[in-house]
Structure formats: structure tokens, C-alpha cells
Image: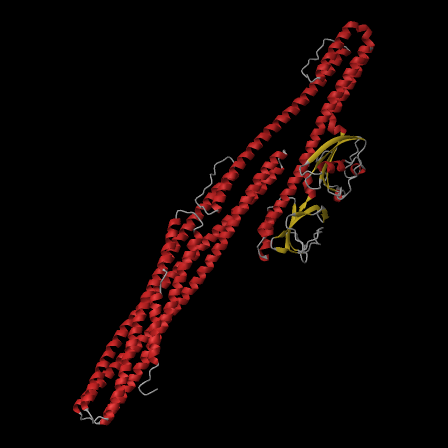
Amino acid sequence: MLLALSVGLVGLVGTAAVTESVEGNALEEYETLAEQEATAIQNWDERNEQLVQSAMNTVHDRDSATVDAYIQDFYYDLPGEAQAIHYVDTTSGELEATTADGMSTLEDIDFPDELSPENPPSSVERTDAYENSEGSVVSYYVGLEDEPERAIVVTFELHQHSTNMATRGNDDAVTVLVDGDDRIIADDEYLGSDDDAFGTEYVDDNEVINEARLDATGTTDNVSAAQAFEGSPSETLADEPYNFSADEYVAAYGVVNSDWIVLIHASDDEAYGFVNTVSQYGVVATVAGVLMIGVVGAILGRNTATSIDRLTRKATRMEEGDLDVEFETKRIDNIGRLYDGFDSMRVALRDQIEAAESARQEAERERARVAEINDQLERKASEYSDVMQTAADGDLTARMDPGGDNEAMTEIGREFNEMLDEIEATVERLNQFATDVATASEQVTASSEEVGSASQEVAESTQEISDGADRQHQALQTVDAQMNTLSTTTEQIAASSNSVADIAEQTAQTTHEGRAAAQKAVDACEALEDEQRAAVEEFEALEEEVDQIIDLTDTIAGIATQTNMLALNANIEASRSSSSNDTEGFSTVAAEVKELSQDVKRTAEQIDKRLDSVQTQTQRSAQEIDHTSEEIERVNDLVSNAVDALDEIATYADKTNNGVQEISAATQQQAASTQEAVAMVDDVATVSEETTAEAQTVAAAAEEQTSALTEMVDSAESLTQQAVHLSAALDRFDTDADDSADDLIESVDGGTEDHGASFEFSSVEAADEIDTDRSQPSPDGK
């Protein structure tokens, strides 16, 4: 009897120890499962926030006409559980753009939170879970920077997420997600028909939720635990749609870093199915052994006692963890069957432990593989970050090494290198073009100086004509006075006539010289027109180059968007990983890639703004050159008029010379009458007055020409300075053509310092002399 009791006690203790160990492993498995579910929901929540932030960054600064088309395209790139995206006027609550059919206000979409421009959300915020016409949902929203009256709202379906829960389709297990108010907002059963379970309060008879919130207090890490409960679950689980009515069950919880909690419930049979079988077999085997020993103990005697002792020792070894002990016996009685029962239990336990160990080793290998991939991605992302930062600082000679095992990162490296090649080539072409523009501007300035010199000669010739006409006028006054005293002295009249003849001859000669100078001015104006047309062609080429750079900046923005989507995909992949440590590595890499893409995008936007400024300056310079061209044509017309006037002056000078010669002959002969001499003097006075008037007209035309040329020189200098500014703007990029850009700035600064100054001052002095001549009286006293 003592032996039977001893064997029974050993069997029960061994069975209890094995049962307790395996039950502990089962609780750990459910705790891990709850933690994984909580991590998956947390990753889902963070991914949704990143998607909304990405939508806000891209919609920012877009006009209302393009927002609708953008959000339609963005919606098709969202995951399947995304229900709708809205562009909201927070003042009126109207949906200015939406992907939801038939919806026009926040009230139409059952939006639960209040949006107002006085308190716009500066970061992505999440609403409480709520129901709309399509089921249980949650919305994320954020206000636009610098536009407090606008916001982006994206709605995601909670019930769709339940398809990813591990207990889906298992009738002996229930998983629910509760919010901060202990309401059920998601589960593994689609919340029952018509979402009957949504919003139902989770009745926490065992205070599992309170314990979970207490454990999560003061930490941002995910918290999880599992424990077994006796008795039926709460009415929340026992009723529809869950019908979870186990007598004993296991509950595990996982706290998301927000106020959500994942609760997993499994029946005792589901959680400990194999353990219960082992326990039952152990108890049955122990009882059978005790009965057999009690019935046949007296018969078997010492042999039976020996077998029992041996069985006890082997059971003790198995209890100590030696599952390789052999339970072999030649007995075919109850002791033999007891041996067989213990052996079956040992084999089953060994197989279960080996399977668990194999699964653990496989998980370790997978974890090592994912860690290696994370390390490779982090190294490659760090290399790409350095190259992108170098390029963002202006060194366009930097290149990425696209080698590696990750095809996506390799493709990014190749495309980034090709983009830098195109940008560097474009910057070099712009530098060369700026050099050509500066050279053309210098040629225009030089041509303007030549025209200015010709204008100065015209002014000087006109001044000489005016002086000669003035002297002629004075001589005619003397002749008029002497005609009244003609009888006094004929010799004085003859001398005066000879003097007038010399002056008339000088006037004719000066007139011919003025006409030649005016013709030179016409030729210079025509050459200047050719230079102006060449400058216009150069500016048109510059506008084409700027358009090409704008296309390149669009390409940069597109690559930045693709990089951003790569970061989002990395987050999604991280959420599917079975280890929270792996998720952290993926999330870090994705965040760095996203930050780099934003840096590239901001750099593209700065280049685009700088090119818009250059394009505006180019258009303004083209307008100034067009205006200069019109002024040149007007000056050319004025110079042509001056040539015609000089021709008339030459004719009048010839007539004056002939008249003076006739006067000289008349005074020598003294046969003509005094009345005819007076008439001739009147004619000469009239011609002299006309000559003076024409000279003043030519002087005025020369003055206008000088003013127009001054404006043209100013325009050429402005063009030169704009070319210098363009080169300076391009200097922030390091390319092989940087030295030529520096030479351009030095040559232009030295070559354009004093252009146009010399002939401007001389023209002003000539104009002042002409104004002085105008102040003298005319021959008839007017």
C-alpha cells in the first residue's frame, strides 16, 4: 500500500510539474501574441499619421483648382482600408475637395471632432473611433501651415483591419480592441452583423483593463501580460456576436502607446489543449498504477516492487528534464502498460519541446536575417544621406555608389546620379551662356561709345555752323550799315564783301563735314541695331535654358515623392514584421529616407524660386532691349533728318557764297544801283537767318540723339549686371565650369565700370553751347 501511494504521489507531482511548465509557456505565447497585435495596431496608427502628414506637405501651397485632382491621385496610392480623403474649410465646415461621393460638409461624413481656424491642429491628430454609413472608422486630420482655415482629413476603416488579427476564424478565441472609454472599437469578427458590437462597453469583471492601464503608467513602451481565469467570461464576450462561453479561459492584453488596449481571450482547451491531455493521461496512468499495485501487489511481491521502483526512478528523471529515459519493459501486465503510458507521455512531451525549440531557432535565424538587412539599409541610407547633403550644399560633383543587394536603394542611387549629371551639365551651360551675354553686352556698350563719339562730332560741327552763321549775321549787319554810307568808301565795302565770302566758304565746308559726321552716326545706329537683335536672340536662348532647369526641378520633386513613398512602404513592411525590434530598425531607416527626400524637395523648391527670379529678370531685360531698339530707330530717324537738314544748309551756304561774290563784283564795278545791293543784302540776311534756324534744329537733334544713346548704354550696363547676377547665383553649385564663371564676373566688373561716361558729358557740354547760341539775337532783331 505504501508503495502504491508513493507511486501515485510521484505520478501526480510529476504530471503537475509538467502541466505547470507547459501552461507557463502557453501564457507566454499569448502574451507575445497580444504584444504583436498591439505593435501591429501601433504601426498601423503611425503609418496613417505619416500618410496624412505627407498629404499635408504636398497639398501645401497648391491652389484650390489643383487640390481636387491631387487628392484623387493620392487616394489611389493609399492602402485598401483608407475610406476617403477630404480638403476642408475649417471656417464653414465645407469639403472643398473630397473623394467621397455626395458629401459636401463635415456633418455629411459624421466627423466627430470640431475644427476651427482659431485653433488649427499643428500636428496630425486622431479622432475617437466612430461609425459612418460604411461602418466603424477613425479619422486623422492636420491643419495646413500658414493656412489655419484649411485642413486635411483622411478616414480609415477599423473593421477592415480585423482581417489581419491572428485569432480570426478561431471559434475558441476572441480578440477585441478597446479605446480609452473601454468601448469595443474593433475585433476579429467584423463586430458582428451591422456592427452590433461597435461601441459596446467591455464589462471587465476581472479588472484586466485596469491592470493594463496601471502597468502602462509612466512608460511609452508597449506593455503586455497574460493570466488564466476560472469561471465564465463577462456577458460582453458570452453574448452575441462572440458567444464565448468557456468555463475557464486565458486573457492576454497589449497596450498600444496611445489609450487603446488589445485583449485576447482563449478558452482553457484552446490555450492548454495538449497540456490538459498530458495531465489527464498522467492522472489516469497514476491512478491505474496505484490500483494495479494495490490489487496485485501481494502477488507480484518483490518483482513488482522492483519494477515500480525502476519506474519511479525513471519518472523522477523525466521530471528533472531527462526526456531520453527509456520506458521499456518485458512485462505485459498493468505495470507494462504503465510503462507504455509513461513512454507515450515522454515521447509526446519531447516532440512538443523539440517543435517549440525548432520554432524558436527559426525565429532567431529570421531575426538575424532581418537585422542584417536593417544594418545594410542603415549603412546605405547613411551613405546616401552624406551625398545628398553634399549636393544640397552646392557640390554637384558628388555621386552615390549605387552598389548593394537592395534593388530599390540601388535604383535610387542610379537615378540620383543621373539627376546630378543633368543638373551639373545645365549649370555649366548657363555659366557659358552668361559669359556670352556679358560679352555681347560689352560689344553693345562699345558700339554705343562709337555712336556717342560720332554724335559728339555732329554736335561740334553743328556748333561751328552756328558760330559761322552768327559771324555771317554780324557781317551782314555791317554791310547793311555800310550800304547807307555807300558813297563814303567803296574800299571798305569791298573788304567787307571779301570777308563775307570767306565766311560763306567756311560755312559750306563745315556743312559738308557735318553731313559726313551725320552719315557716320547713321551707320553706327544700324550696327547698334544688329547688336541689339543678337542680344535678343541670346535672351531667348536663356529663357529656353531656364525652362529646362524648371523641368529638372520637377524631376527632383518627383524623386523626392518616390523616396517618401519608399519610406512609407518601409513603415508598412515594418508593421508586418514579427518582432518589435525589427520594426524599430525599419522605422528609423524609413524616417531618415523620408527626411532626406524632404531636404531634396526643399532644395528643388529653392532652385525653382531662384530660377523664377532669373526668368523674371530676363523678361524685364528683354523688354528694356526692345525699348532700346525703338529708341535706336527713333534716333536713326532723327539723324537722317539731320543729314537732310545739313544738305539744305549746304545748298543755302552755296547760295550765300554766290550772293557774296556778286556783292563783291558789284562793289568793284560800282555800276549797279544801291537799291539792288540792298535787295541782295536782304536776301543774304534771310538765308543767314534760315541757316541759323537749321543749325539750331540740328543741335536739338544731336542733343536728343545723345540722350537716347545714354539710355541705351544704361540698358546695356543693366544687361551686363544681370548676367553677373546670374553667374553669382550659379556659383553656389560646384562644377567643373566654376573657374570660367569667376573669370566672367571679374572681366565684366572691370570692363563696364566707366562705359558711356565720356560722350555723355561731352554731349551735355555741346548742348550747353547750343543753348548759349540761341540766346543771341537774330539779324532782324527777333
**Screen quadrant of the N terminus:** top right
Vertically, is 521 above or below 555?
Answer: below
Left or right relative to 460: residue 283: right
Asked whether, in this view, residue 777 is left or right of residue 606, the answer is left
Residue located at (38% from left, 66% from top): 712
Tell which residue pokes out farthest to the left in this image.
669
* Quadrant occupied by the C terminus: bottom left
* Residue 277 drawn at (x, y percent): 75, 23
Residue 509 location, quadrant: bottom left
The foreground one among 21 and 270 is 21
Count of numbered circles in the view: 0
**Residue 241 visible in the picture:** yes
Q: Is residue 414 left or right of residue 3?
A: left
* Residue 522 picture location, percent across and down: 31, 70
Residue 49, position in %: x, y?
63, 45
Q: Nearer the viewer, residue 48 or 211?
A: 211
